[in-house]
Image (cartoon, rainbow, N blue to C red):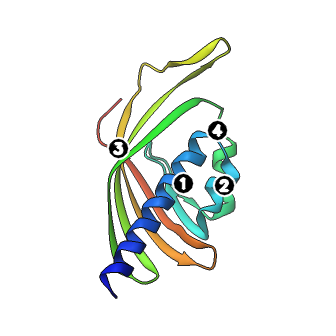
Amino acid sequence: MTEDQLRAIEADVTRLIHEYVWANDAQDWERCASLYTSDAVFRRPSGGDPVVGREAILASFTARPPRAQRHVMANTLVDVVSESEATARSVIVLYMGDAAEDGLPVQDAKSPLIGTFTDRVVKTADGWRFAERTGGLDFKP
């Protein structure tokens, strides 16, 4: 694999992570779920049982009550395994709160949350997709 191919994969995987965050903050759950493989495994930073499969991941998103949120992804590091597989690590900062009818949301007292996502991504016919996404908190709220 050439240096250009490595850099292209790193850029594509980083874009996948950023696209996911923008869709998540917009609460576009269909788009979020579409960025996983059909048999993907998702582990939330807040813990709980793994969610397995794209349909179950979508259901887990739609079951959540709406909230104001903004995810910030930083320090993303992509390691290319092959032309069709890579891993990535990112720091996540999550600001959240209650929506306000009269303007800006009110920030939750437990916000921000700081954690890490560790991803395994694969190239599919639809582009790069999450095969595994594991979140974890680095500090107690």
Pick whichever of labels 3 and 4 is earlier in the sequence: 4
Which residue matches tag 3?
Answer: 115
Q: Looking at numbered disc 4 in the image, what kind of residue is underneath it? A: Arg
Upstream in sequence: badge 1 or badge 3: 1
SS class, disc 2: helix
In the image, residue 115 sits, relative to residue 82, either above or below, namely: above
Residue on which the image places disc 2:
31
Farthest residue to the bottom: give it. Answer: 1
Residue type, numbered disc 3: Gly
Residue 57 visible to an observer of this rendering: no
Quadrant assignment, res 124: bottom right
User: Residue at the location (52% across, 58% down)?
Assistant: 42
Which quadrant, please, contains the N terminus?
bottom left
Looking at the rendering, in which quadrant would you find the C terminus?
A: top left
Point 50% across, 61% down: residue: 16
Residue type (three-letter) at the residue carrying disc 2: Arg
Whole-number angstrom distance, CA of label 1 to CA of label 3 = 19 Å
Q: Are marks 2 and 1 in contact (CB under 8 Å)?
A: yes
Query: Which residue has dot 1 on it?
Result: 19
The residue that mark 4 highlights is 64
